[in-house]
Amino acid sequence: MESVQKPLLKVDQLKKYYPIKGGVLSRVIGQVKAVDDISFEVFEGETLGLVGESGCGKTTTGKTILRLVKHTEGSVTYQGKNIFDLTKKGMREFYKDVQIIFQDPYGSLNPRQTVGDMLREIMKFHNIARGEEAEKKIKELMKMVGLSEWHIGRYPHEFSGGQRQRVGIARALCLDPKLIICDEPVSALDVSIQSQILNLLKELQQRLNLTYLFIAHDLSVVKHISDRVGVMYLGKLVEITKTDELFEVPLHPYTRALLSAIPIADVDHSSIKAILKGDVPSPSNPPKGCVFHTRCPECMEICKKELPVMREVKPGHFVYCHLYNEEMLDENVKNNTLYNKIEKNPKN
Amino acid sequence: MTVKDAKVSSEIGAPIKTSTSFRDDAIRRFKKNPTAIIGLIIAIVFVLIAIFGRYITPHDPFAQNIVNSHQAPSAEHWLGTDFFGRDVLSRIIVGARISLLVGISVITIRAAIGIPYGLIAGYYGGKVEMVMMRIVDAVISFPGIILAMAIMAVRGQGIENVILALSITGWPMFARLVRGEAMSLKEREYVQASRALGYNDGKIMFQHILPNCLATIIVYATMGIATPILAEAGLSFLGLGATAEQATWGFQMSIERQYLRYAWWSVTFPGMAVMIVVLGFNLLGDGLRDVLDPRMKE
């Protein structure tokens, strides 16, 4: 599941700005930069986690990739094709390969359709199976997601939250997709149910060779399921690397602050928490320079003026921060003090 | 709604009774709903009266007898007589045909235009909605009766023209209602999920959004049946709707209204007929709404 694989999905300089309308003639008077120039790749067979606090644009990213939200700029390439250029027919094929699991298990199922009707409709629409064959496939799907055959004729309101999420997974699996965008699939569930659903997703991934783009705000969930993790802040992707590396050697000051906020169940554990000051700035009026500079403990002069560049600091480890710009990086790498220096930084 | 065979397996936790199909279940629940049954009975009775009215009138509804003018209700004339000495009960029975025809067909046509219109406007939003809803505003802002009169003036007198005129003036309310529902429903995740399944807009609108606004539509439509019945009266009163040889409830009420003080029966009973029809359809509509909602399933 490592990086030698080819990218399945490539997001390139994706932007999604929402206009703010105001005034008498509802002119556009500003923009909310929900997703601002982010690029990443999802490799085949892996799980890429996407974390960040609420409002940082992770869900918008997921929905823009599926064209549920219209993008502003940039491209999303799937199997060599920019999906924003696809025709209706092309999109239909695309949706066969890329599916989504939603956050809210109560809102994501049509209250007037039984599970069976829903799955039958999907298979009929995409010409996958009809009649007996469809029934057989539905039974298989139900079994696969841990539901029983007698659940087929049931309406969504007759299920519990966890069961509904299983139905949502069955819907996503119905088209035999390659990539599933999981939009906070467990954050609306009880902790005990969360682990069940996570394990189900893991199991399905191994069985069906699925690729996940896993959006979440819960770091422990992401740590559990992801192979690589991307961290988002205010519409920007600030750091992306392998899960182990991110949790062991977080480089971006925001990531470090985020990780230090994870409670550790050990009374003797005394960690210096990097508590951030202030609130997240408004995405309609993000700070000049690096978006994080207003809260960054490592803020330098350059951060207030210039946007940093996404830089590969170590193989497969990308950071969006001036601390790792060319001059400083060369110096750090030469002296092999990259991580140590940050650790010993008195400001922290 | 064709799930029939959710079989009972030996699994732990499996339901004891086999789940029935939605249709069977809906019928069973409808039968258990006394108000819905009453509504259905009223509706059926009035529809039968409308169809067979001519054959069951106790008197000739058109025979004038000025000597008998404004007789109070009696054994001979159960609901009294009107100004021309015609039997009010017979007039109501015969009038049911046109009044119900106008009421039901106008609501049906209004819904047939307004529902897709509102769905499209609400679903697409943006500029499409802007333009479409401004047209709706224009139709609403135009005085309905004047517009109807203009249409009647062009098309001439006759019941079919009454239906046409009233349909054209009334559909925007359906459009507004459905647009509002569609706007809120399209943001639901299950609609987004439908889009992510590659479904086209028509399928999403009519198969996923429309069924979920049914409750509102049914209630509005059944409540609205009275309006065209009364509007027809207005047009008839102006000499644009039913002719003097035809009997309608509205027309009866509008010409007899002036005698209300000393012959209350000739206007009150046709009015009660309108009220009972509306009540009947309303109860039926309420029952249907509950029955068609799977969440009310036991």
Image (cartoon, coloured by chain):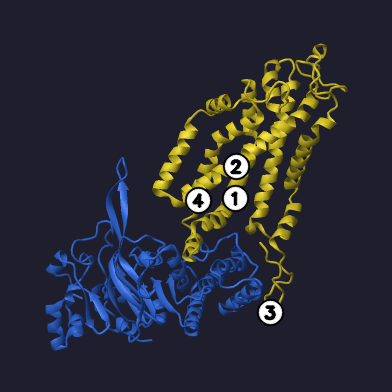
C-alpha span from label 4 to label 1:
11 Å
Q: Amino acid at mark 2?
A: Tyr
Q: Secondary structure at mark 2?
A: helix
Tag nearer the camera, 4 or 3: 4
Spot the residue most to the top: B67
Subunit under mark 1:
B
Q: Are marks 3 and 1 in contact (CB under 8 Å)?
A: no
Spot the residue most to the front: B155
C-alpha span from label 4 to label 3:
41 Å
Subunit under mark 4:
B
Spot the residue most to the right: B75
On the picture, is B71 further left or further right than A55? Answer: right
Tag nearer the camera, 3 or 1: 1
Q: Amino acid at mark 3?
A: Glu
Disc 2: CA contacts within 10 A as few (<14), some (14-19) or many (>=20) = some
Q: Residue A64: x and y, percent?
A: 37, 64
Dot 4 or dot 3, earlier in sequence = 3
Disc 3: CA contacts within 10 A as few (<14), some (14-19) or many (>=20) = few
Q: Residue A249: x and y, percent?
A: 27, 83
C-alpha span from label 3 to label 1:
37 Å
On the image, numbered disc 2 is attached to which residue?
B220
Task: Point out which mark residue B214 bears.
Answer: 1
Dot 4 or dot 1, earlier in sequence = 4
Dot 2 or dot 1, earlier in sequence = 1
Residue A273 visible in the shown view: no
Q: Are marks 4 and 1 in contact (CB under 8 Å)?
A: no
Q: Residue A172: x and y, percent?
A: 50, 71
Residue A334 visible in the shown view: yes
C-alpha span from label 2 to label 4:
16 Å
Q: Are marks 2 and 1 in contact (CB under 8 Å)?
A: no
Subunit under mark 3:
B
